Image: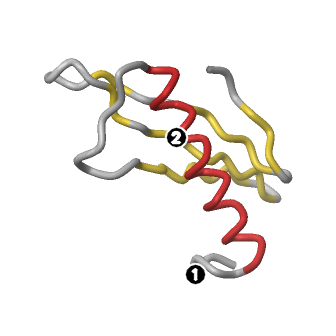
Amino acid sequence: MKKVSYKGHVIEPASHRLRSGGWAARATVIIHEKNSVKKIPIFGRRRASFDSRQKADAYALELARLWVEGRIWGANGCG
């Protein structure tokens, strides 16, 4: 899955294969501010795994979107 733009943030899915053969959900939210770039890692549940990279990326993308919503509304401790 490629980078996705969501409400002024860039989300880059980065799910990875586990030794067990499943896929762990992971993404990075990229925030471009004045003179800096912040990269916020987003991880899926520790024990959750998926049958395919596409499913893991889709879940990670949803988690990242929820993080962005929380940032916009001030619900996740970020300003």
Mark 2 or mark 1, which has the lower sequence index? 2
Density class for disc 1 (Cα within 10 Å; few <14, some 14-19, many ≥20) is few
Label 1 SS = loop
Q: From this viewpoint, which residue is outermost toward the front?
A: 51
Residue 21 point in image, percent of width and height: 21, 18
**How many tags in the picture?**
2
Q: Residue at x 44, y 39 (%)?
A: 26
Residue 59 — which label?
2
Q: Residue at x 77, y 71 (%)?
A: 72
Residue 14 point in image, percent of width and height: 48, 30
Question: Mark 2, mark 1: which one is toward the viewer?
Answer: 2
Q: Is residue 30 left or right of residue 44?
A: right
Q: Residue at x 60, y 51 (%)?
A: 64
79 relative to 11, above or below: below
Q: Quadrant of residue 12?
A: top right
Q: Is residue 15 left or right of residue 74?
A: left
Kind of residue indicated by mark 2: Tyr
Residue 55 point in image, percent of width and height: 49, 27
Residue 74 point in image, percent of width and height: 70, 81
14 relative to 69, above or below: above
Residue 77 — which label?
1
Kind of residue indicated by mark 1: Gly
Q: Residue at x 33, y 52 (%)?
A: 45
